[in-house]
Image: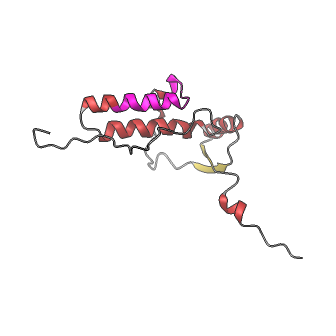
C-alpha cells in the first residue's frame, strides 16, 4: 500500500471449489455452525481493508448458500453463546463423549447441559476399528 503497510486478503488456489460441509449432512449442528464461524472469523481477523473484508464475507456467504446453508445459519450466534472463563467459581463441567445420532443427540445435549454435563460427539466407527480386527482363537 502507499503508506508502507501490508495489505492482507484470503488466498484461494485456482483449483479451490468452495465445497464445505453441506448443511443437510448428518453432522451435529455445532459442527455445521463452526464452518460459518471459522470462515467469518478468518475474514474479520486477517483481512486488512474494509472493502476486502466486505468482499470476502460476501464470497463466504455465497459459497455457504451454495452448500445449502439457510440465511439464519449465516448470522452470527447470539452473544450469550460465548463461553464463560474457567475460574474457581465456575468449576469445569463433566465431559461425556457419545456417537452422534440425528435428532436424539440434540435432545440429550440439552438435558445434559441442564445438569452441567458437556456432551461432545465422537465417531462410532473409526478407521482403526474398521481396519484392526481382534484375533480370534481357533
- Residues in magenta, as a range: 56-73
Looking at the image, is 98 positioned above or below residue 137?
above
Q: Nearer the viewer, residue 72 or 14?
A: 14
Q: Residue at x 30, y 41 (%)?
A: 46
x and y percentages locating residue 117 in the rendered image: 61, 45
Q: Nearer the viewer, residue 117 or 73?
A: 73
Looking at the image, is 95 positioned above or below residue 8?
below
Residue 110, image quadrant:
top right
Q: Residue at x 15, y 43 (%)?
A: 5
Left or right: 138 in relation to 92:
right
Q: Residue at x 89, y 76 (%)?
A: 138
Of all residues shown, which one is farthest toward the front? 14
Residue 82 can be seen, yes or no: no
Residue 70 can be seen, yes or no: yes
Left or right: 4 in relation to 21:
left
x and y percentages locating residue 123 in the rendered image: 66, 51
x and y percentages locating residue 65 in the rendered image: 50, 27
Looking at the image, is 137 positioned above or below residue 97?
below
Magenta span has 70?
yes
Q: Residue at x 33, y 29 (%)?
A: 55
Amino acid at each position: 500500500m502507499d503508506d508502507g503497510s501490508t495489505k492482507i486478503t484470503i488466498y484461494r488456489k485456482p483449483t479451490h471449489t468452495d465445497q464445505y460441509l453441506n448443511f443437510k449432512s448428518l453432522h451435529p449442528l455445532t459442527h455445521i455452525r463452526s464452518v460459518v464461524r471459522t470462515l467469518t472469523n478468518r475474514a474479520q481477523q486477517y483481512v486488512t481493508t474494509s472493502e476486502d473484508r466486505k468482499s470476502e464475507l460476501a464470497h463466504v456467504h455465497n459459497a455457504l448458500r451454495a452448500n445449502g446453508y439457510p440465511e439464519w445459519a449465516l448470522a452470527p450466534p447470539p452473544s450469550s453463546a460465548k463461553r464463560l472463563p474457567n475460574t474457581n467459581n465456575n468449576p469445569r463441567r463433566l465431559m461425556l463423549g457419545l456417537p452422534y445420532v440425528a435428532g436424539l443427540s440434540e435432545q440429550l445435549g440439552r438435558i445434559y447441559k441442564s445438569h452441567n454435563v458437556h456432551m461432545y460427539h465422537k465417531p462410532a466407527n473409526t478407521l482403526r476399528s474398521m481396519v484392526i480386527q481382534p484375533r480370534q482363537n481357533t
